């Protein structure tokens, strides 16, 4: 395993998935890398997530990917896992701010990596880089050349992730840095916000506390969900063994409609509670199908979806049932 790893985005959904993975491994006696997590508010994070305190393999460093001078200068790292700028906080940023966070943040980390002896760099990108999935395409493969319309500001996230991927390729060519791209799709787990724009999180919230489970759209779009424990294992496998200069889809390839998902969540968590499908057509995202082809991860790295969706829903609900949002 790696010796010295810098993790950005370590306090978000992806980061906490990785930290929980390492905590579990540490309890099993696995020798871990020395992990440094870049965070803007280390004390707040430690106070909120006490399970990550006093871990001998973990250091929190106060810094920001948009402020290069705040990165852990003068320290050598073997690996960087760049998981900052995930999709959870997007609604709080303007489009230009979001673009800069993703693109300039990635460039700052690439420059830092070159200067500090990093040999492997993993970028968490997004399935959003493909743009709308064609109706006739059952699953999106990594060699599909589609992309979001760059003239639509609403596509900032997907376009910026494409540019960040290209920056990685340029640094590999010019500086010899081994880069691997993780194109991440949709996930579920105890750290998923139940009050954001994630349908599965909203359904779990409704099943736990609302009078009914509400589907805002018409329920027809297709999605798939990978448990965050699988996500963590997949990201570390890509960082360690993914082919340099290559992208890998990260997600589940088991499709389910949004309406069926709402009913599944209801059946598991609140049998008998009504499911209300409001019936508004999905007009904002243009994303009626969002399912990855994960054949590359399977064939090259032996990765599989190991946790069934039903189990993920039950465990996510159990982890959140004592802490109602807003209370």
Image (cartoon, rainbow, N blue to C red):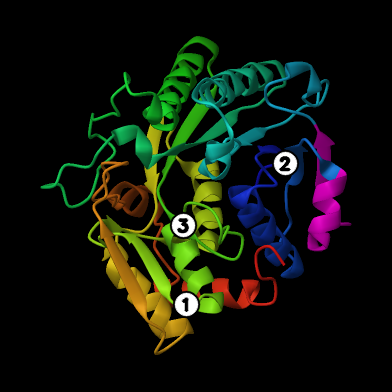
Looking at the image, residue 242 sits to the left or right of residue 7; the answer is: left
Q: Residue at x 26, y 41 (%)?
A: 286
Measured as percent of width and height from the top left, residue 305 is found at 40, 64
Give x and y (percent) for residue 105. Answer: 61, 23
Between the residue at mark 1 and the residue at mark 2, the CA separation in whole angstroms equals 33 Å
Task: Give the number of the disc on residue 3.
Answer: 2
| Up/down of 293 relative to 182, above or below | below
Of marks 1 and 2, which one's residue comes earlier in the chain?
2
Q: Quadrant of the C terminus?
A: bottom right
Residue 198 on the magenta segment:
no
Nearer to us of marks 1 and 2 is 1
Q: Which residue is mark 3?
A: 187
Q: Nearer the viewer, residue 196 or 242?
A: 196
Please name the residue shown 54% across and 64% down the image.
189
Q: CA distance from mark 3 to mark 1?
A: 13 Å
Magenta stretch: give its range.
43-62
Q: Earlier in the sequence, mark 3 or mark 1?
A: 3
Q: Quadrant of residue 26?
A: bottom right
Q: Quadrant of residue 102?
A: top right
């Amino acid at each position: 395993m790696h010796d010295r790893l810098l993790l950005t985005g370590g306090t978000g959904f992806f980061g906490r998935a990785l930290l929980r993975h390492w905590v579990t491994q540490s309890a099993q006696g696995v020798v871990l890398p020395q992990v440094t997590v870049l965070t803007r508010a280390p004390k707040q994070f430690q106070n909120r997530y006490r399970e990550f305190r006093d871990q001998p393999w973990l250091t929190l460093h106060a810094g920001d990917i948009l402020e290069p001078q705040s990165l852990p200068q003068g320290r050598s790292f073997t690996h960087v896992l760049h998981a900052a700028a995930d999709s959870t906080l997007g609604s709080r940023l303007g489009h230009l701010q979001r673009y800069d966070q993703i693109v300039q943040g990635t460039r700052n980390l690439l420059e830092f990596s070159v200067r500090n002896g990093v040999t492997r760099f993993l970028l968490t990108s997004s399935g959003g880089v493909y743009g709308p999935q064609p109706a006739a395409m059952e699953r999106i493969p990594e060699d599909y050349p589609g992309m979001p319309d760059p003239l639509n500001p609403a596509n900032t996230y997907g376009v910026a992730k494409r540019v960040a991927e290209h920056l990685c390729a340029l640094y590999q060519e010019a500086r010899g840095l081994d880069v691997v791209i993780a194109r991440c799709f949709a996930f579920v787990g105890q750290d998923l916000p139940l009050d954001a724009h994630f349908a599965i999180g909203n359904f779990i919230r409704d099943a736990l506390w609302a009078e009914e489970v509400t589907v805002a759209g018409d329920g027809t779009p297709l999605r798939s969900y990978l448990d965050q424990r699988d996500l963590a294992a997949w990201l570390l496998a890509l960082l360690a063994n993914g082919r340099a200069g290559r992208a890998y889809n990260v997600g589940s390839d088991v499709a389910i409609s949004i309406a069926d998902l709402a009913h599944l969540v209801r059946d598991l968590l609140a049998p008998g509670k009504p499911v209300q499908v409001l019936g508004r057509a999905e007009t904002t995202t243009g994303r009626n199908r969002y399912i990855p082809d994960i054949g590359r991860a399977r064939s090259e790295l032996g990765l599989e979806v190991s946790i069934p969706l039903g189990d993920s829903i039950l465990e996510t609900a159990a982890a959140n049932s004592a802490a109602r949002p807003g209370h």
